[in-house]
Amino acid sequence: MLDLVRKHARSWLIKVALFLIVIVFIFWGGYSYKARQEGYLARVGDHYISIYDYDLYYRQLVEMYKRQMRDSFSEELLQRLNLRKQALTQLIDRQVIAAAAQELGLTATTQEIQRKLAEFPVFQTDGRFDPKRYLFILRQNRMSPEVFEQQVGQDLSLQKTEAFIKRRAIVTDEEIMTDLRFNYTVFQVAYVFFDPKSFEAQVNPGEKELESFYQRSQERYKEPEKRQISYVLFNPDSYLSDMRVTENQIKDYYEDRGTQYHKEQEVRARHILFRVKDDASETDVAKARAEAERVLTEAKQGKDFVELTKKYSQDPTVGENGGDLGFFTRGRMVPEFSEAAFNLKPGEISDLVRSPYGFHIIKVEDVRPEKTTPLNEVREEIETKLKGEKARDIAHQRAREFTDSANAQKDINKAAQTTKLPLTATGVWVSIGNVLPEIGGVPIQGQNKLFALPEKGISEILEVPKGFLVAQIDVIQPPQVMPFEMAKDRVEKDYKADQARILAENGASELLARSKALKGLEEAGKQAKLEVGKSEWFSRLEPDMNLGMLQGDAETGTFRLTLSDPFPDRPLRVQNRYGVFQLIGRKLPDGALEKERSVITKRLLGEKQGVLFQTWLGDERKKYQIEVFKEL
């Protein structure tokens, strides 16, 4: 899969790697000497975190997620991740760790900083550190070598401190054996499933039964709280025509974001992967190499590369699309892969390339040369963006002025008359999850604020897709139970589903009791004229395809079964079905310890290191008075 080859820059709190900020500076825009301190957001002991530093860090964190998530990225995702709070937490923790590094004598040396600089692909020419390119990239980002190297040094210090703390974690043989038995013991079961849907046809309720069900279950048929609001929308588009941008502003924007308009050389390639584990034996390596060389011969003889990929590649996420990795820069792939790919011309096929993931056969499809887009080609784009930013600032300012007036008069309508602004809409009914779709909706945080207001309450400025919203609550309608006639179709559907579930569970319970009496599910199923299935061998880590991933009671009930007590106490619910299980086999595979020891050790060590480091960090935080001056 692509993740096997691509190297993502990750936040150390997400994947415990401390080089996110430096990497993003280089590829996103870095520091600007034009930055203005706009006050402080938080304090860690005697160290203050400025709003500017926070905003910069937050934007870099967002950019990292955009690059990793691509099409899956959304504003909703940012809210779910609570990325604003996450960014501040990380900045606070970085400061705490930096102070600890100083105390422990783990600050980075000049030689370590120099070695790290030489490793950045963006500073290299033909695979070697290029001082001229280094200074050129920093100038484009309005950053001095001193500032950048200080940041690199700090991140190296954080890395060293983290590694020092984690070295105290150990994994014992007893822990390895416990994990082996828990995760790698394999089971085989006989089973019969009862699907409630197959019982729904047996349920034919009358009117009285439905009404009785409705009376017992009225909470199901409550309409959510609704609110009637009036609001004014401040749309930045309304102010665009009055915005002016100077040539100097355009030039400053272009220079401040030099790397945004500079594209590194990119290669589009396909690959065929033959996986080789880190701990593979020489025999396994030789076997994989022989297979890869045989396919390489076929590829170089002119056989269709796409078909070869689909047939042989062990990278499942790209096998179906012919191994296409899309366009990538040098820094996006592991060094071995990049070195080979960037030395090929379009249409050429590499020799075997060994990487930490195995053997690759690479075919380059296209090459995009390094390019810096000149200012005259993006002037109009920058002008439009700057005008949009100015218009947004004006819209926010107008919204702030209007909010002050509305709160002073305690009436949004009077404020609109005073400021000679028409209300965008009045008397609009909204409910959580359905707030003003006609203006692009309101993010969930804004909805929560609207629904926390009292009647006649006026909102703060709410940011929405089309600008800024100020609203007043006219009427609050509490949650109300729908009349029976309106809810009747839903009531009937719910009644049938509930009764069918009961029938399915009862049928499963009867079969389970009969199976225990006969000491066998096979015989009980035969008497009931039910087909009894038989699973493949499965474990917690490798589920059976027909049973699927067992969760909750189904997991607990299945994996506690023994050959002397092969039946669960009751039918097990697997997704929406009720299952009757009988254990027919349980064992630890031969050679499991030798085969899995290194994998288990690595996983347990990672888990223990993570817990150890977070515990240490929590203790370190207690040493400082930490204040947050502004809610995010």
Image (cartoon, rainbow, N blue to C red):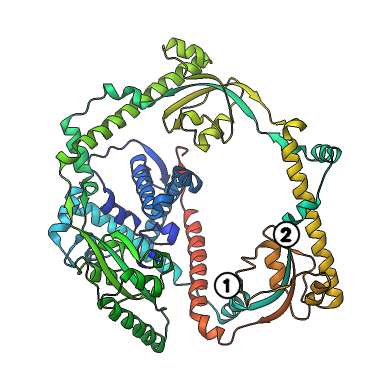
Image coords of residue 29 (percent x, y): 26, 48
Q: Is residue 537 above or below residue 616?
A: below
Q: Residue at x 63, y 28 (%)?
A: 226
Q: Which residue is mark 2?
A: 195
Q: Residues within 10 Å of mark 1 (few under 14, many from 20)?
A: few
Q: Residue at x 15, y 44 (%)?
A: 374
Q: Residue at x 49, y 65 (%)?
A: 610
Q: Amino acid at mark 2?
A: Asp
Q: Is residue 155 above or below residue 463?
A: below
Q: Which residue is mark 1?
A: 542
Left or right of 45 on screen, residue 364: left
**Quarter of image, res 587:** bottom right
Q: Which is nearer the eye, 286 or 235?
A: 286
Image coords of residue 376 (percent x, y): 14, 39
Picture quarter with the N terminus:
bottom left
Q: Amino acid at mark 1?
A: Glu
**Quarter of image, res 464:** top left
Q: Residues within 10 Å of mark 2 (few under 14, many from 20)?
A: many
Q: Is residue 298 above or below residue 422?
A: below
First along the sequence among labels 2 and 1: 2
